[in-house]
Amino acid sequence: MKKRIVCLLFMFIIILFNVSSYSKTKDFYELQFEVINNNENKNFDIYLLLPEEYIEFVIENDGLEIEYTGIDTLKNNDIPSINVDKSKLQEDIYKEDGVEYIQILLDKDKKDIYSFEILSNYTELNMKYRIKSESEDYIVHIDNFKIENDICEIQYDVDQNIVKQPDKKVFSFYTIILIIILIIIILLALISYINQKINK
């Protein structure tokens, strides 16, 4: 009985490690932008600004022979790894420090989150967000943000007028495994104790 349980425990740990490594091999991670604490119900337009460098990287990654020509690159070509509604592309190009950014108007999903997929093998977080309303127009830099579980979560707190990542109490993967192993060991000890009581 004990040998079976030990074997099951060993297989369980191997499966957990395989699931963890598989989750890190996705082709894309997701940018998620959320507006929170908008108590005055202000209306915002949220734009994702894709840098020229990223668009050229995707073109090469997809094995396409397309030359970057600004907004027309996305308007006139189908690039599989940039899933964008062409009607959301903005004609005016944003420029910063000599870099061109294509502006994409984003729509909220049912959870009020503005999402966009980015190739996971692109290592720079040099895309930006633009928040526009009647009274505001500013650029959000996310280059110091973190990607966790293939998601980069970004929150714009309207009341505090700050952009941040959500506060989280996170257990590491290995801490979770340790907790599971301790629970299994306790269960094994209980089973062993009960078996000894029955056999007496």
Image: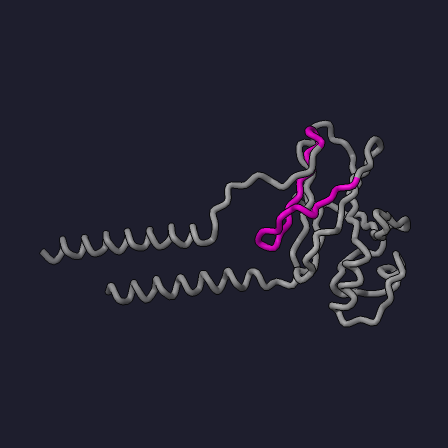
User: Residue sitting at 88 percent across and 63 percent down?
Assistant: 76
**Does 78 appear in magenta?**
no
User: Residue sitting at 80 percent across and 54 percent down?
Assistant: 51
For the C terminus, which image quadrant? bottom left
Total marks in image: 0
In the displayed structure image, the side of residue 12 where residue 132 appears, left or right: right
Residue 35 vertical position relative to residue 96 in the rendered view, above or below: above
For the N terminus, which image quadrant? bottom left
> What residue span does the magenta drawing correspond to?
139-161
List x then y, in percent, for residue 106. Answer: 77, 47
**Does 157 appear in magenta?**
yes
List x then y, in percent, for residue 175. Answer: 42, 50
Render colour scheme: one colour
Residue 3 vertical position relative to residue 40 in the rendered view, above or below: below
User: Residue sitting at 45 percent across and 61 percent down?
Assistant: 16
Residue 39 vertical position relative to residue 45 in the rendered view, above or below: above
User: Residue sitting at 29 percent across and 54 percent down?
Assistant: 185
**Furthest residue in direction left, as rendered:** 200
Q: Which quadrant of the figure has residue 192?
A: bottom left
Q: Which quadrant of the figure has residue 60?
A: bottom right
Looking at the image, which is closer to me, 126 or 134? 126
In the displayed structure image, the side of residue 34 where residue 82 appears, left or right: right
List x then y, in percent, for residue 65. Answer: 83, 71
